[in-house]
Image (tube, rainbow, N blue to C red):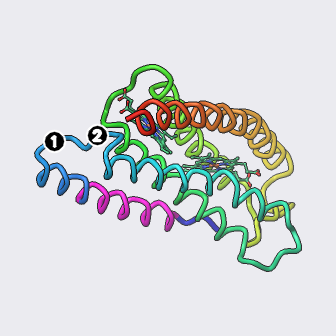
Amino acid sequence: MLRGRELWLAAITIILLNLIYAGVIWWTREVPASGDLFGHSLGILGFTFMLMTETLYSLRKRSRNARWGRMAHWLEFHIYTGLVGPYMVLLHTSWKYNGLAGITTLLMVVIVGSGFIGRYIYTRVPRTVDGTIIEGRASEAALRKARRMLALWHAIHIPLGVAMFAAAFLHIGAALYYATFLK
Ligand code: HEM
Ligand code: HEM
């Protein structure tokens, strides 16, 4: 199940991203602007990763008979893209958090934090490699409690994601209109 491999891979990717980011600063002698080639690319690529995070695992989860990859691997991938994507977007922000773009960033950080809480609860419930909950291994009451916690967490995590994507699409529309096309 979740053994932390996805966290290590995300950490290694983030270190590589930091090296590239530092290299660009060294080369240009300035912090990459959100709307310049490098900063813009980070925003688009990171946001693509976030869209994959939002959709792919849910799609796989809802197709129980599907053969395309184990659920556990899809969840690992969900967490990997759910960390690397927001990190790229963080490098895209150029460390300025005004207005709508700032609110979007805040929501993004909150949902990543919420993801860690969900990961913790998720690993408390014993499962098969395919993500199905194993009955009877934990005591009945403890299992019921963990399931209830996970359901409550879903009820918070999912609307947070919807709010973040709504804000992100508004920001993207406004940024493209004012900063890209009007230039
Ligand atoms: C969740 C995803 C995203 C977040 C949280 C985010 C956040 C931000 C932040 C904080 C800024 C700096 C605003 C400022 O300078 O005050 C910014 C700028 C910008 N963003 Fe994003 N961004 C995201 C995705 C995107 C995407 C996908 C695109 C392009 C398709 C984009 C295009 C831009 C542009 C063009 C600017 C520069 C605006 C300007 O120069 O005034 N952003 N973004
Ligand atoms: C851009 C960031 C993220 C977004 C938009 C996002 C979105 C979602 C969504 C929509 C679900 C519901 C899936 C479903 O039941 O259909 C979910 C579940 C989950 N996410 Fe995320 N997530 C993000 C980041 C993370 C991170 C960083 C972690 C872990 C550190 C994480 C861990 C989990 C876990 C454990 C579940 C529950 C899986 C289950 O109950 O089957 N997520 N996420």
Q: Quadrant of residue 49?
A: bottom right
Are the residues flagged by discs 2 and 1 in contact, CB closer than 8 Å?
A: yes
How many callouts does the rendering have? 2
Q: Is residue 17 magenta?
A: yes
Q: Quadrant of residue 62?
A: bottom right
Instruction: Identify the amino acid type marked 1.
Output: Glu
State whether label 2 is within 8 Å of ligand 1. Answer: yes
54 displayed left or right of 176? right
Closer to the camera in the image, 133 or 67: 67
Q: Which residue is mark 1?
A: 30
Q: Position of residue 121 (x, y in %)?
A: 66, 47
Q: Which residue is mark 2?
A: 33
Q: Residue at x 52, y 49 (%)?
A: 47
Disc 1 element:
loop
Q: Residue at x 70, y 60 (%)?
A: 57
Task: Name, please, the residue furthest toward the bottom.
Answer: 67
Vertical placement of 74 versus 114: above or below?
below
Mark 2: few/some/many CA within 10 Å (<14, 14-19, 20+)? some
Instruction: Identify the amino acid type marked 2.
Output: Ala
Q: Position of residue 16 (x, y in %)?
A: 30, 62
Q: Residue at x 46, y 19 (%)?
A: 99
78 displayed left or right of 6? right
Q: Position of residue 12 (x, y in %)?
A: 35, 64
Please provide the residue range marked out in magenta: 4-19
* C-alpha separation, residue under disc 2 versus residue under disc 1: 8 Å
Q: Position of residue 136 (x, y in %)?
A: 86, 61
Q: Is residue 118 magenta?
A: no
